[in-house]
Image: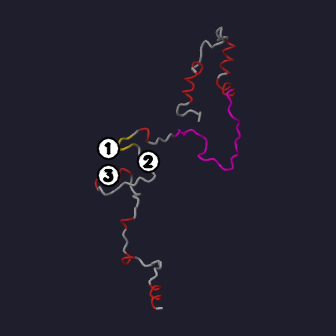
């Protein structure tokens, strides 16, 4: 019977300690604290002076890559904000939630033709500025475009194709 009680006393138990180890002293070196203050240039200057300081890059993408220990900047990776000039704009900088929904049908090729070319073709026909093949004698810049040039312009940055 005494052997049985000895075995029961040596069973391991899990316990949670609510007291602070080392009488309240903490080792803060194991906690990563992001350096949130200061500009990026200030942090880079500090990093060159103090080699132990690492620059925290959370939420910031690099604008280049490192090659043989040297940083190469790629201009295409630098973010560019394109902001229109709104000096003479009468619109307010927000849209109210009370604004009515605008329902607009799809813009068809026929509507595009009517908006861009139809007026010039009609005036050329009335004035008689068409040759024997019914081509304009004085074509505009849009009428001079070849199909492959028109596609290239449409796919260019800033076009409304997307």
Marked residue nearer the N-terminal end (3 or 2): 3
**Segment tinted magenta in the rendering:** 83-109
Query: In the rendered image, which residue does mark 2 sit on?
Result: 61
Relative placement, left or right, of 71 versus 59 is: left
How crowded pointer 1 is (Cα within 10 Å; few <14, some 14-19, many 20+) is rated as few
Q: Residue furthest left?
A: 49
Rendered position, 46 above or below 154: below
List the residue tagged with mark 3.
Answer: 45
Disc 2: CA contacts within 10 A as few (<14), some (14-19) or many (>=20): few
Measuring from the top left, give residue 117's x and y in whole percent. 65, 22
Find residue 42 and report its horizontal and vertical position in percent. 35, 52
The residue positioned 69% from the left and 34% from the top of the image is 106
Q: Which mark is residue 70?
A: 1
Q: Are marks 3 and 2 in contact (CB under 8 Å)?
A: no
Q: Residue at x 56, y 23 (%)?
A: 148
Residue 20 painted magenta: no
Q: Residue furthest bottom?
A: 1
Q: Nearer the viewer, mark 3 or mark 1?
A: 1
Residue 135 relative to residue 54: left or right: right
The reply to whether the C-beta atoms of the residues labelled 3 and 1 are less than 8 Å apart is no
Q: Secondary structure at mark 3?
A: helix
CA separation in Å, label 1 and label 2: 17 Å
The residues bearing labels 3 and 2 have C-alpha atoms spaced at a distance of 19 Å
Q: Secondary structure at mark 2?
A: loop
Which residue corresponds to the image point at 53% horizontal and 39% vertical from the top-left?
Answer: 84
Q: Main secondary structure of the magenta part?
A: loop
């Amino acid at each position: 019977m005494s052997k049985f009680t000895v075995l029961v006393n040596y069973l391991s138990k899990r316990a949670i300690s609510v007291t602070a180890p080392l009488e309240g002293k903490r080792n803060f070196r194991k906690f990563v604290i992001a350096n949130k203050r200061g500009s990026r240039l200030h942090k880079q200057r500090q990093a060159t002076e103090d080699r132990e300081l690492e620059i925290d890059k959370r939420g910031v993408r690099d604008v280049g890559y490192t090659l043989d220990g040297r940083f190469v900047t790629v201009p295409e990776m630098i973010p560019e904000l394109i902001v229109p000039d709104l000096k003479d704009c009468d619109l307010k900088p927000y849209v109210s939630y009370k604004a009515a929904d605008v329902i607009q049908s799809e813009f068809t090729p026929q509507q595009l033709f009517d908006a861009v070319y139809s007026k010039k073709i009609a005036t050329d026909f009335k004035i008689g500025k068409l040759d024997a093949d019914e081509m304009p004698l004085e074509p505009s810049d849009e009428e001079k475009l070849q199909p492959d040039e028109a596609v290239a312009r449409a796919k260019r940055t800033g076009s409304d194709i997307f």
